[in-house]
C-alpha cells in the first residue's frame, strides 16, 4: 500500500464496476468552498453563533485565563484584549469595544422575558455577576446550558433548571435576562442547507440516490447511479459537491461526484493508490475529505483529499487488528474522530487533530460499547454517535468534545438492524439516522436536539431495499 502522494486524477472505470447507461467523458468541475459568513466588527452587529464561538474560544483557553481583580486582560482570537472577569467575558463574547461591568452591560442591551432567551443572551445580576446563555436543553424551556467566568471561564452542560435556587452561587431572583442590542439571528434554514443526500446500496449491488428536503418535507425519486457489484458505500460533501465513495468488486475505492450547484455528476473514477479494503468511511472539513478505511489486512488506513486541485496525500496505516466496521466525523475544530468495531465487537476511537497535525492513541469509544455497526455525525464540537448493539437495536450517545464528556448510551429501538448511516446539517441540530432492518428495508429515525425530541421509525424516500447507506449534507 503506497504512501506516495499523487494528484487527484480521473481515470476510466475498469471492469471492477459495471456502468449502466451513457457516461460523460469529461471530468466534473468541482465546486469551490462556500464563503464563510464574515466575522463581526468591534461594536458591530454579531450573530448568535459567533457570540457562542467567541465564548468557546476563551473556554478552550481557560487554563490560561484566571479570574482577576486587578484588571488584567486576555485577548480574543484576533488579539483584542478584555478584562478577565465575568462581565469582561461577556464583553469579549459580544465583541464590544471595551470591557463593560455588570452594571453597564444593560446600557448596550434590552431586558427580555426569560422564556425568550436565545444563544448569546445573558442573565445579569447588575451588582455582582453575569452568565452567558448557550441554549435550552429541552423543548419546554425548563433547563438550559450557559457559560460563565468564575475562577476561569466555565461551560455548564448538564442542564440547569431555570427555576434553580441559585445560578453560580447567587440567588436566581437577582438575575434579569438581557439581549445585546446588536445581536442578530443566524441565517434562516433553506432548502439548500437542509437537504440530505442519501445513497442506497441495494441487495444486488446497485447504487441509487435520492434527496430529502427537510425544509419542505419531501423526497425526490430514486435515481440510478450507474454502478453494480458494489460492496460498501460512504459519502462526504465539500461545498455544494457530494462525493460518493464505493468499494468495487476489486476491493478498491471508487468515487463519483455530484455537484448540486450545477446539477452534474462525474463518471466513476478510482481513488489514487487505493488499497484493498473491506469497509470505508468519509468525512469532510471545508474542502478537504478525510477518507478512512479498514484494509483487507484488518487495519485502519487513512488518506486526505484536498479539493478541487490539491490531490490526495497518500495512504497511511493507523493500526488495529481484525477491525470490522468504521465511521468517522469531523468536528468544527478540525478534528476527525474515527470510530471502529474491533475484532471483539468493541467500539474504539482514534482522533486526528488536523489543526496540530497529530493523532492520538486508540481508546474505548464513549466509555466502551459492544456493537455490530457504528455511525457518527457532528454539530459544532458535539458528536452524535449511534451504534447497532449486539441485540440488533439502535443505541445513541452524544460526546461534547469541548467539555470532554459523553452523556451515556440510550436504546432507541429498532429490531434486527444491520447497517447504519447518519447526517446532521451544519445549520440545524437534527441528526437523521438511517438503518437497514431485518427485512433489508431502509428505515429512518431523527433526533431533534433543539427540541429534545426523537421521531418514530419510518421508511424514507418512499422506501427501498437496502444492504448499505450513506448520507451527507451539502452547503
Image (cartoon, grey):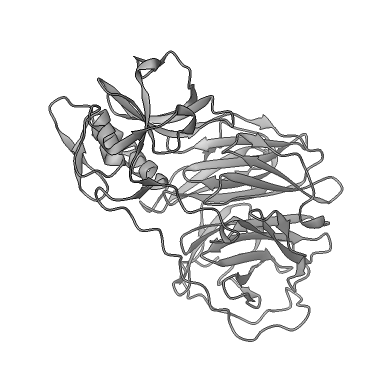
Q: Which quadrant of the rendered structure holds the N terminus?
A: bottom right
Which of the pair 430/288 is nearer the observer?
A: 430
User: Would you say 4 lies left or right of 473 here?
Assistant: left
| Residue sitting at x 52%, y 51% | 427
Along the line of sight, the residue nearer the viewer: 256 or 97: 97
Vertical order, 424 against 393 (above or below): below
| Outermost left residue | 70
Residue 127 picture quarter: top left
Extreme bottom residue here? Answer: 25
Q: Is residue 447 left or right of residue 109?
A: right
Toward the right, the furthest residue is 439
Whole-percent x, y for residue 405 in the image? 48, 31
Residue at the image position 67 percent from the left and 56 percent from the top? 216
Which residue: 48% across, 70% down?
307
Q: Is residue 280 visible?
A: no
User: How far across and how far down the image is residue 267, in percent?
Assistant: 65, 78
Residue at 29% x, 23% y: name it: 129
Where's residue 84, x and y in %? 21, 32
Q: Residue 181's image quarter? A: top left
Q: Where is residue 400 in the image (x, y as percent from the top left)?
A: 49, 36
Inspect this view and state whether residue 20 appears.
yes
In this rendering, the answer to whether 435 lies above or below 288 is above
Lateral position of residue 174 relative to residue 163, left or right: left
Amino acid at each position: 500500500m503506497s504512501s506516495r502522494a499523487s494528484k487527484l486524477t480521473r481515470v476510466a472505470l475498469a471492469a471492477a464496476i459495471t456502468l449502466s447507461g451513457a457516461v460523460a467523458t469529461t471530468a466534473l468541475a468541482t465546486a469551490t468552498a462556500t464563503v464563510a459568513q464574515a466575522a463581526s466588527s468591534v461594536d458591530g452587529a454579531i450573530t448568535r453563533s459567533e457570540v457562542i464561538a467567541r465564548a468557546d474560544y476563551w473556554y478552550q483557553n481557560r487554563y490560561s485565563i484566571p479570574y482577576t481583580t486587578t484588571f488584567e486582560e486576555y485577548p480574543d482570537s484576533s488579539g483584542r484584549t478584555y478584562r478577565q472577569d465575568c462581565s469582561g467575558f461577556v464583553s469579549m463574547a459580544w465583541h464590544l469595544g471595551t470591557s463593560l461591568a455588570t452594571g453597564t452591560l444593560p446600557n448596550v442591551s434590552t431586558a427580555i422575558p426569560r422564556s425568550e432567551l436565545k444563544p448569546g443572551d445573558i442573565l445579569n445580576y447588575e451588582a455582582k455577576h453575569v452568565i452567558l446563555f448557550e441554549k435550552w436543553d429541552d423543548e419546554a424551556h425548563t433547563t438550559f446550558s450557559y457559560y460563565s467566568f468564575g475562577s476561569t471561564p466555565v461551560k455548564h452542560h448538564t442542564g440547569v433548571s431555570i427555576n434553580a435556587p441559585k445560578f453560580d452561587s447567587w440567588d436566581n431572583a437577582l438575575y434579569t435576562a438581557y439581549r445585546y442590542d446588536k445581536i442578530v439571528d443566524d441565517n434562516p434554514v433553506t432548502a439548500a442547507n437542509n437537504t440530505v443526500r442519501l445513497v442506497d446500496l441495494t441487495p444486488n449491488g446497485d447504487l441509487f440516490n435520492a434527496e430529502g428536503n427537510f425544509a419542505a418535507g419531501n423526497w425526490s425519486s430514486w435515481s440510478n447511479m450507474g454502478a453494480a457489484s458494489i460492496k460498501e458505500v460512504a459519502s462526504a460533501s465539500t461545498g455544494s459537491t457530494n462525493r460518493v465513495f464505493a468499494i468495487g468488486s476489486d476491493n478498491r475505492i471508487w468515487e463519483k461526484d455530484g455537484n448540486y450547484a450545477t446539477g452534474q455528476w462525474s463518471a466513476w473514477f478510482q481513488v489514487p493508490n487505493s488499497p484493498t479494503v473491506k469497509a470505508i468511511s468519509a468525512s469532510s472539513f471545508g474542502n478537504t475529505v478525510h477518507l478512512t478505511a479498514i484494509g483487507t489486512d484488518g487495519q485502519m488506513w487513512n488518506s486526505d483529499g484536498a479539493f478541487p486541485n490539491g490531490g490526495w496525500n497518500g495512504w497511511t496505516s493507523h493500526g488495529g487488528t481484525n477491525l470490522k466496521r468504521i465511521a468517522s466525523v469531523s468536528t468544527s475544530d478540525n478534528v476527525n474522530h474515527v470510530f471502529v468495531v474491533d475484532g471483539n465487537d468493541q467500539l474504539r476511537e482514534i482522533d486526528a487533530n488536523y489543526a496540530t497535525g497529530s493523532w492520538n492513541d486508540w481508546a474505548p469509544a464513549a466509555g466502551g460499547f459492544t456493537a455490530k455497526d457504528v455511525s457518527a455525525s457532528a454539530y459544532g464540537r458535539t458528536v452524535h454517535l449511534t451504534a447497532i448493539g449486539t441485540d440488533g437495536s439502535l443505541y445513541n450517545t452524544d460526546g461534547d468534545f469541548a467539555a470532554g464528556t459523553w452523556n451515556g448510551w440510550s436504546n432507541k429501538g429498532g429490531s434486527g438492524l444491520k447497517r447504519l448511516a447518519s447526517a446532521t446539517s451544519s445549520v440545524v441540530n437534527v441528526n437523521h439516522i438511517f438503518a437497514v432492518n431485518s427485512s433489508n428495508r431502509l428505515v429512518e429515525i431523527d433526533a431533534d436536539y433543539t427540541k429534545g425530541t426523537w421521531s418514530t421509525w419510518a421508511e424514507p424516500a418512499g422506501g427501498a431495499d437496502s444492504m448499505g447507506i450513506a448520507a451527507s449534507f451539502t452547503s
